[in-house]
Structure formats: structure tokens, C-alpha cells
Image (cartoon, grey):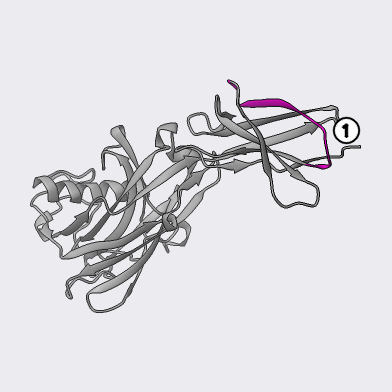
Amino acid sequence: MRIRATVAAVSGALALSALVVPAAQADGAPSYGKDDVQAAVQAARQADADGPARSTFAAEDTGTPYALDATFSNVKVNNGKPIVAGTTNKVTVPVTYTVTHAADVDLNAADTWLDVEIYRGELGDPENGNSLIGDDWPVCTAASSTVATCKGTIDIFPAEELTNADATTWKAFGYVIDWNDQDPFGENIDFNKVGVAQQDNLATTKLQRFSKLTVNASPEPVKKGKTITVTGKLTRANWDLGSYKGYATQSVKLQFRKKGSSTYTTLKTIKTNTYGDLKTTVTASTDGYFRYSFAGTATTPAVNATGDFVDVQ
């Protein structure tokens, strides 16, 4: 389980660690997973938007948070590139941004939470969307008394967090919450003492299903003028099944690079069948490499097969 926040009693009040510590390294302090953190953030957001609200943890939440003077700008997810995820390996992408705040807002205070997450669908509603955060809290460096530059991550575990519906455009959402010694995970939160700044539509990013492409040209060697059969397969991550499945009816280019050249030339374009398979023929003319090339779609990145050399005699 991922651990994102630890808590410890300080002078009779609950203070939150500004650093994320794995449970095994928390020196005995209670720890909370990412779902707990997101639930606490959602409770504060809801109280800020709708007035008094109950959190997942509290029995008698009361009050409405006050507006915290903090805004986000220059948000960039994965350096502006699409995020590509396979079926099993963890994917970590950078998130950078600027926070402008009042001089009395301490972004590095132990009881202040700050982050930028990405989501699709309806924010805070897992039944109608999804959201992704990092394993660690971001690190913010003061550029002045009112401006900070921050670096964080989005950490994705495909097998646990993604379905095929997640291959789409996501939005970035940012928040700063000053709990002012209120326990986000306890009972009887007085939201009148909690400061909240939240900002939506900070940036967009695409999440794509990792693709694979193979090629095999035969026979090898072959006589000049004879037929070469070129087969291959285009697959992509299926997050619903946790495996790679053929990408059907997709246009793929067959390309050739003459021996001694560094440039591929397109010979023809064909389509994958129902199972993602590719098959076509060409006439042998000279030594060189054959490959298939897929340009990609909105949900799937471009990919080139590794060239297969054919010796023409």
C-alpha cells in the first residue's frame, strides 16, 4: 500500500508531517494511505464549496473553511508530453508549477497540505471518473516571500488504478489546505479553522495505452525477384484485463531501409485485422531492413518495429 502522509502528536495537538515517509520508516507514527489523504482533501473541498459537510473520518464536522490566499500558475504535467502506461510497471511523471500566496501563508508548515493532481470525469467522484496523485508531497522552494516554485510527481500503478476508459484527456487540479492543527483524519473537525484554496483547469494531459509492434520478413535469405512475406502484430495495453491485446483495424505503414542507408521509405499502408495481425508481400530487390510503423491515435502512442534485415542474393 502506498503511504502518503504520517501524523504525530505534538504538544497535545495533531501536526502533519511535511514529508512522506513509508510506514516502515515512520518511527512508530500512525500512517495513512493515499485513499485516506484524498478523502480528507475531498472533505475540505466539499466543505469549502457547500458549507458544513461530513468527511469520511469525522462524526460531527462543522463550519465552513475560510479562503486561503494562494493561486497556481505555470502548471506543466510530464513536461507537456502525453503520459504512457503499460500494464504492470509503475509510471512516474513530473509535475511543476508556481504558487503565489500571501506573505502569511507558510507552504512548508507541518499542517499545510499542497498538491496538484490530475483527474478525468467529475473531480472527487470515483464512480464518474478517476484521479491520480503522487506517492510523495511536492517540494516547494521560495522564490520570494510570496512566490514558490514547486516540483512533484504523479505516480501511476496501472494494475491498481487504471481502466481502458482512462485513456483520454485529464485535467490538473491544485489545492492548498491549512489545517491549523485540525486533525484531517479525526472526529469533530471545525472547518471554520481550516483555510482552503482550490483551483481547477490548471492544465491538461493525455494518458495513453502503451503500444508494441513487431515485424518478421521471410524467407531469409531470398533470391532477387522472389516474394518476401512480411508479418507483424500491433498490440496495446488493456488496463481492464491487465495484458496486451491486438489493436484492430489500424493503418500501419510497411517501410524499407536499404543497407547502408539511415532513412526508411514507406512501401505501402495496410490495416491490422481483428487480432492486430499484419501481413503483406513485396518483391525482393536489394539487401535491407523491413519494419512496420504505426502513427498512433489519441489513446495510443506511435511505435516503430525494430527493422528485420533480409539478405537478397
Left or right of residue 140, residue 264 in this image: right
Q: Position of residue 312 (x, y in %)?
A: 87, 37
Q: Nearer the viewer, residue 59 or 286?
A: 286
Left or right of residue 86, residue 34 in this image: left
Relative to residue 263, is residue 21 depicted above or below? below
Left or right of residue 97, residue 25 in this image: right
Q: Nearer the viewer, residue 155 or 248?
A: 248
Q: Position of residue 146 (x, y in %)?
A: 22, 75
Q: Nearer the viewer, residue 115 or 212?
A: 212
Number of numbered discs overlaid on the protein picture? 1
Give the magenta part as a residue range. 274-288
| Residue 79, quarter of picture | bottom left
Residue 300: say if magenta: no
Q: Going by the picture, which residue comes out furthest to the top?
A: 274
Residue appearing at x 26%, y 42% in the figure: 123
State the residue position of label 1: 224
Amino acid type, label 1: Lys
